[in-house]
């Protein structure tokens, strides 16, 4: 999402959002901030209406409810921007059509004038008559050239406008598929790709899934604040992103949790990749902005699962999640494979 509020107004909206979150006992994570910021800023009427109804009923939003509202009203806001681009493009095409039609009409009149002057040239041979015809032809030619020049300028201007719309569409698409904090694909896109990969794997091949969680992340936020916490998330995300290749997908799954989809990968190779990533993350050194000191060792726990015949999305994710839980319960900073 892009906002055009002033710094002062944004600060006020943020203060109001945090007040509502406190009343709701809402989690302090990006999805929650986005939902309540949209609510207090008043720019998302459908979201506001649903939240008002829930609050009137005394409902306290769970993280799952917040995520559902985010996906329904915030993450999909790109559709409105896409509609705007569609409408603007339609206007451009109509303007070009009008200009081309006008130029075509002038061209037809010019052709007709040429025929008339040609007849006059055949009928008259006097010098003065010829001069009159030449002068009239010059006027007609200049007028036609001006029309063509106007059309050319119109086409040039509209081409620039269409280039601008193309860039808007690129940005909308980027915002729709990407997590704002990390640049990785978001959970919605990940689940879509996961479902596609699973359907392909039903026929042949193998598919593995890594669920990654940053160890003791709550302590980072509590002791150092959310800005440093966000920095940790970004650096871990960057490590994951450079570790995948080809048809692999690294995604922000939620909060401090990530998911990596590995098509055409055996369980053993997935475990080896997970171990390589774990070691890379151990070498991350996050510096504090206030004094330049390093945060200390950042570690992750990883759960690994591989596709089994007949798996649906939830069953495979559940096994990876159970493996991740085992890694956490076993002391963290380790990789665990799903149980048989």
Image (cartoon, rainbow, N blue to C red):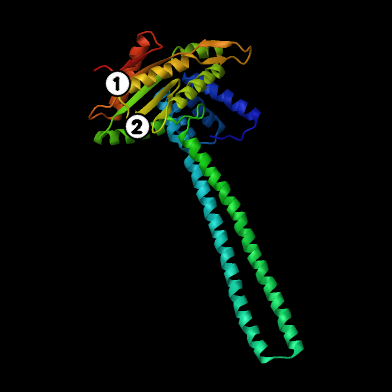
Spot occupied by residue 8 in the image (x, y as percentages of width and height): 65, 28
Q: Is residue 150 above or below residue 259?
A: below
Q: Which residue is mark 1?
A: 319
Left or right, 266 with reference to 294: left
Count of all numbered marks drawn on residues in the image: 2
Residue furthest to the top in view is 331
Tell me the SS state at disc 1.
helix
Residue 194: which disc? 2
**Cα gap from disc 1 to disc 2, whole angstroms:** 15 Å
Residue at x 49%, y 20% (from the top left corner): 23
Residue at x 35%, y 32% (from the top left corner): 194
Residue 159: which disc? none
Residue furthest to the right in view is 128
Q: Nearer the viewer, residue 258 or 245?
A: 245
Say few, some or many: other residues with alpha carbon within 10 Å of mark 1 (under 14 / 14 to 19 / 20 or more): many
- Residue 315 picture quarter: top left
Q: Nearer the viewer, residue 16 or 226?
A: 226
Residue at x 51%, y 40% (from the top left corner): 172
- Residue 269 picture quarter: top left
Tell me the SS state at disc 2.
helix
Spot occupied by residue 207 in the image (x, y as percentages of width and height): 31, 29
Residue 222 can be seen, yes or no: yes
Q: Is residue 142 above or below residue 287?
A: below
């Amino acid at each position: 999402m892009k906002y055009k509020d002033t710094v002062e107004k944004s600060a006020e909206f943020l203060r109001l959002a945090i007040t509502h979150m406190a009343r709701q006992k809402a989690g302090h994570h990006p999805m929650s901030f986005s939902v309540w910021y949209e609510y207090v800023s008043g720019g998302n009427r459908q979201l506001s209406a649903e939240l008002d109804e829930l609050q009137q009923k005394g409902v306290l939003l769970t993280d799952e409810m917040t995520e559902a509202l985010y996906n329904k009203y915030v993450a999909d806001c790109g559709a409105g921007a896409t509609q705007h681009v569609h409408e603007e493009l339609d206007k451009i095409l109509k303007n070009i059509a009008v200009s081309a039609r006008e130029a075509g009409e002038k061209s037809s009149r010019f052709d007709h004038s040429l025929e008339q002057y040609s007849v006059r040239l055949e009928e008259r041979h006097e010098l003065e008559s010829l001069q009159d015809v030449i002068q009239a032809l010059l006027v007609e030619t200049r007028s036609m050239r001006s029309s063509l020049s106007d059309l050319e300028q119109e086409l040039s201007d509209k081409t620039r406008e269409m280039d601008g719309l193309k860039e808007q569409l690129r940005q909308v698409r980027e915002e729709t598929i990407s997590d704002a904090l990390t640049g990785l694909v978001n959970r919605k896109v990940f689940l879509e790709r996961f479902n596609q990969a699973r359907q392909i794997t039903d026929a042949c091949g193998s598919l593995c899934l890594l669920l990654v969680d940053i160890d003791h992340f709550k302590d980072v936020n509590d002791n150092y604040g959310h800005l440093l916490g966000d920095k940790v998330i970004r650096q871990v995300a960057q490590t994951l992103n450079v570790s995948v290749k080809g048809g692999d997908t690294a995604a922000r799954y939620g909060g401090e949790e990530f998911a990596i989809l590995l098509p055409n990968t055996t369980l053993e190779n997935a475990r080896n990749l997970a171990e390589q990533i774990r070691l890379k993350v151990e070498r991350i050194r996050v510096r504090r902005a206030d004094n330049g000191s390093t945060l200390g060792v950042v570690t992750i726990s990883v759960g690994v699962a591989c596709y089994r015949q007949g798996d649906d999305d939830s069953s495979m994710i559940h096994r990876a999640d159970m493996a991740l839980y085992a890694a956490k319960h076993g002391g963290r900073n380790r990789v665990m494979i799903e149980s048989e």
